[in-house]
């Protein structure tokens, strides 16, 4: 279960949260396509060990390997997930492979 409880974080996670919030405050986005809407909150998933930001529409942003914020997307059909720059997604949040399969039916 995800948490927003700082007392559940270790020192490493607190440092990562500080980096995440700093990137957000500096608007350090990977591309102009990456964004979050209103009611942005931070969350920590202890199962995946991921810290991320999430908005009211459940859009997620995390820090990528370049130290920039980037949307983390997942395909509702096949479950493929990753940073926007790593996986080809269509506008409706399905991956290009699933989109091709749907169009070929």
Image (spheres, helix red, strand yellow):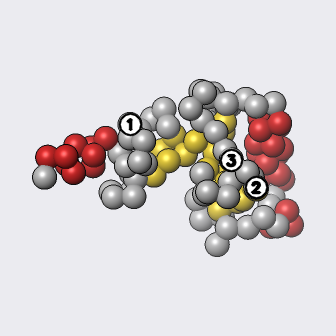
Element carrying mark 1: loop
Res 33 → quadrant: top right
Residue found at x 83% / y 36%: 25
Please state which of residues 49 and 20 is positioned toward the viewer in this rendering: 20
**x%, y% of residue 71?**
58, 42
Could you tell me how far apart the alpha carbons at marks 1 and 3 are, in whole angstroms?
Answer: 22 Å
- Mark yes or no: residue 62 visible: no
**Which residue is label 3 attached to?**
37
Tag 1–tag 2 contact (CB < 8 Å)? no
Who comes first in sequence, dot 1 or dot 2?
2
Residue found at x 80% / y 61%: 9
Q: Nearer the viewer, mark 1 or mark 2?
A: 2
Could you tell me how far apart the alpha carbons at marks 3 and 2 are, in whole angstroms?
Answer: 7 Å
Element carrying mark 3: loop
**x%, y% of residue 28?**
73, 29
Q: Nearer the viewer, mark 1 or mark 3?
A: 3
Res 45 → quadrant: bottom right
Residue found at x 21% / y 51%: 102
Tag 3–tag 2 contact (CB < 8 Å)? yes
**Which residue is label 2 attached to?**
39
Could you tell me how far apart the alpha carbons at marks 1 and 2 are, in whole angstroms?
Answer: 27 Å
Element carrying mark 2: loop
**Which residue is label 1 attached to?**
88
- Graded by Cα atoms within 10 Å as few (under 14), some (14 to 19) or many (20 or more), the crowding at tag 2 reads few
């Amino acid at each position: 279960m995800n948490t927003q409880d700082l007392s559940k974080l270790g020192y490493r996670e607190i440092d990562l949260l500080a980096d995440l919030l700093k990137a957000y405050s500096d608007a350090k986005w990977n591309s102009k396509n990456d964004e979050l809407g209103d009611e942005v909150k931070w969350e920590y998933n202890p199962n995946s060990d991921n810290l991320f930001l999430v908005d009211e529409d459940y859009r997620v942003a995390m820090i990528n390997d370049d130290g920039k914020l980037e949307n983390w997307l997942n395909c509702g059909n096949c479950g493929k997930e990753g940073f926007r720059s790593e996986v080809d997604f269509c506008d409706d949040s399905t991956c290009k492979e699933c989109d091709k399969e749907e169009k070929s039916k």
